Image: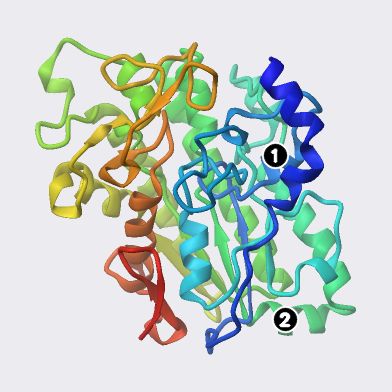
Amino acid sequence: MAAAAAASSALPVLLLFLLPLSFAAGARSPCFTSFFSFGDSITDTGNQMLLAPEGNLPHCCFPPYGETYFGRPSGRCSDGRLIVDFIAEHLGLPLLTPFPGKLHSNDFPLGANFAEGGATALDFHFLAEKGIYNTHTNLSLQVEIDRFKELLATICSSPSECKDYLSKSLILLGEIGGIDYNRAFFEDVASDKIIAIVPYVVAEIGKSVKQLVELGAVTILIPGNLPIGCWPGYLTKFWSPNKEDYDPLSGCLVWYNNFAQHHNKLLQHQIVRLQKLYPHTNLIYGDYFGSATRFHRHPQKFGFTGSAVVACCGGGGPYNYNESLICGNPGSKACAEPSTYVNWDDHHFTEAAYRIVAKDVLEGPFSTPRFNASCLVGRTTDSGRHSSY
């Protein structure tokens, strides 16, 4: 694609956009001095852009992505900030810099983001054995954890020093696993085979929690899956003529949301088991699904007067999703006011929706156990400005 080639030639300039915005020193969290995150495109703040093959940048790297907050594509798959960005603001920390595995601790004094768009929880080869092929990337959660260990080795010089450092860090582990399922559903893998991999996905997340705790992590926020039956991509591909297949309040596909909840229930059971295994830790389940369901079912109460199921940016159709003309490609179009829409593209929220989810998880009531409010130093107002308590 000509546009991709042109963008690739300007890659050094684009990389400057991935650096955190200027940060005015002020109050910081009394609990956390650093912040690290893992996951897929829901959390990626630029790794996908950094690691893309030359001349083949992903569509999130082109306008109108980033238009609302950054004024340019920042590597985030949204019109602006993500949940991870709002969490950083609530902690009084700068937005996280992506870590592609090439830089060192001097570049990451307050944390780093290892999430990459397209990343799966399960290993590429394991998924292939199950008939699920991730043609986008072979990056898995374990690869992200390994990159974290690489960086950690440059930050602290001994296991005890690392434990002390991580005891004052917040870890965001996910959302992860969504791509494992997305690939399978969109490749038309039988539903019973997809259901069968859920315990493996959850076990892999649990394995990562164990590794992080053994390194010294104490507080880990572990989000569940979002209501995938509300994504424009799912609503388009799995359209049904049967009204009973849809939630009458939200217009979302019931079966796919039930599937996401199945993953979430198994994940919560896993977290309970791990909490008993590591009683000195604080393992928090982030209920992204519960938060999002509120504004999917009652969008106007949250200011979403455009649509809760149609994509703001896309290539047309009932849900503004066209597989051959996705957001960021020439010919696609974006709505005039993204803040009035829940969905930005086929399976990512707008900044406005992500802001609500972050607030719900951090300030309550969509976290179990509740996040310690005394650890927060500020909140993001509806205007997007950071204000003190």
Q: Which residue is mark 2?
A: 165
Q: Secondary structure at mark 2?
A: helix
Horizontal and vertical percent for residue 253? 24, 27
Foreground residue among 219 and 1: 1
Is residue 67 in sight in this rendering?
Answer: yes
Q: In the rendered structure, which disc, 1 or 2, sits on the residue that comes first in sequence?
A: 1
Describe residue 214's horizontal placement relative to residue 320 as left or right.
Answer: right
Q: Is residue 304 above or below residue 64?
A: below
The residue shown at (53%, 84%) is 29
Q: Which residue is mark 1?
A: 49
Horizontal and vertical percent for residue 226? 37, 43
Horizontal and vertical percent for residue 380? 38, 69
Nearest to viewer (mark 1 / mark 2): 1
Horizontal and vertical percent for residue 136? 66, 25
Q: Which amino acid type corresponds to the residue marked 1 in the rendered image?
A: Met
The residue shown at (47%, 49%) is 80
Place residue 47 in its image quadrant. top right
Number of numbered discs: 2
Is residue 143 in sight in this rendering?
Answer: no
Q: Are marks 1 and 2 in contact (CB under 8 Å)?
A: no
Foreground residue among 167 and 324: 324
Q: Quadrant of the N terminus?
A: top right
Q: Which amino acid type corresponds to the residue marked 2 in the rendered image?
A: Tyr
Q: Is residue 315 above or below residue 123?
A: above
Place residue 56 in its image quadrant. top right
Q: Is residue 314 above or below residue 84?
A: above
The residue shown at (31%, 47%) is 339
